[in-house]
């Protein structure tokens, strides 16, 4: 096994874990990092699936109590039933759009220039939303309404464009709908579970022929590093949003986006 590939797997696992749940676009960062590290062969498509699953496992571990409680109460508790319905409502728009335009998006939009442009535009939009935002009364994910879930779901559709960020679009959609920052962020975490699982299963079935036993060490390293880094970031990020806004992330996106455009143009 090439040691360089193991090192790349380690780095990209960290990139995925660190960026998946903060509003800076994990897909965008992975595209940029893969280009810089020259890791863009066929196996990279499957590798991305495994590191995303590692990041999602981190959410499931961090919020295991809520997930277990929801699963147990799915048939007889109104709160659990409503939470599942709201997740489904938020999940559906991007799932439909993804199925309809998956190939077109992958073919035309998955390149560093589009990522750079999306990072910059998304950064300015984040700053604008934060500047216009009125602080909301604190709530929790069980108090989200169907209308708010739908707004978050529609906002998530924009994340199909690489560089926009699933986390950024859902959190900003939550803020626009009237959620406070912490609730919008936690709902974004929970929504990541079905949407990324669905996307991973779809990508895995379409790229199943690429799987090779020789790739197992690379996938495993990426999975583990993505899980550990994502788990740490979730804990840090949720504490951060309780007392801070997202303007810093907007400026970061603009800075990285401009560098990406300049470098790859």
Image: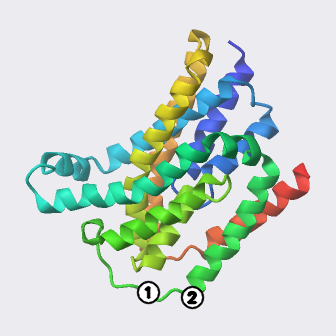
Q: CA distance from mark 2 to mark 1?
A: 10 Å
Colour scheme shown: rainbow
Mark 1: secondary structure: loop
217 relative position to 260: left or right: left
Identify whether 253 is placed above or below 16. below
Mark 2: secondary structure: helix
> Which residue: 74% across, 37% down?
34
Q: Is residue 210 visible?
A: yes
The residue labelled by disc 1 is 135
Identify whether 89 is placed above or below 176. above
The residue labelled by disc 2 is 132
The local crowd at label 2, few if under 14, some if 14 to 19, many if 20 or more residues have their Cα within 10 Å, is few
252 relative position to 206: left or right: right
Q: Quadrant of the N terminus?
A: top right
Identify whether 136 is placed above or below 194. below
Which of the 4 image quadrants contains residue 183?
bottom left
120 relative position to 54: left or right: right
């Amino acid at each position: 096994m090439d040691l360089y590939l193991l090192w790349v797997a380690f780095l990209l696992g960290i990139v995925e874990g660190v960026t998946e749940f903060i509003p800076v676009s994990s897909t965008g960062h992975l595209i940029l990092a893969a280009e810089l590290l020259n890791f863009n062969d066929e196996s990279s498509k499957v590798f991305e699936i495994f590191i995303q699953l590692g990041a999602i496992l981190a959410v499931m571990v961090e919020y295991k109590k809520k997930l277990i409680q929801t699963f147990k109460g799915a048939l007889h508790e109104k709160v659990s039933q409503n939470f599942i319905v709201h997740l489904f409502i938020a999940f559906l728009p991007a799932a439909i759009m993804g199925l309809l335009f998956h190939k077109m998006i992958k073919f035309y939009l998955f390149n560093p220039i589009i990522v750079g442009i999306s990072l910059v535009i998304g950064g300015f939009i984040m700053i604008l939303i934060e500047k216009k935002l009125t602080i909301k009364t604190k709530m929790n994910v069980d108090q989200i309404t169907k209308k708010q879930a739908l707004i978050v779901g529609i906002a998530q559709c924009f994340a199909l464009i690489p560089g926009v960020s699933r986390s950024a679009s859902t959190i900003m959609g939550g803020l626009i709908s009237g959620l406070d920052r912490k609730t919008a962020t936690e709902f974004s975490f929970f929504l990541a579970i079905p949407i990324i699982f669905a996307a991973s299963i779809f990508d895995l079935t379409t790229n199943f022929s690429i799987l090779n036993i020789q790739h197992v060490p690379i996938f495993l390293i990426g999975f583990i590093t993505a899980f550990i880094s994502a788990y740490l970031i979730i804990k840090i990020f949720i504490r951060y949003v309780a007392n801070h806004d997202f303007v810093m992330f907007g400026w970061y996106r603009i800075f990285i986006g401009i560098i990406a455009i300049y470098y790859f143009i």
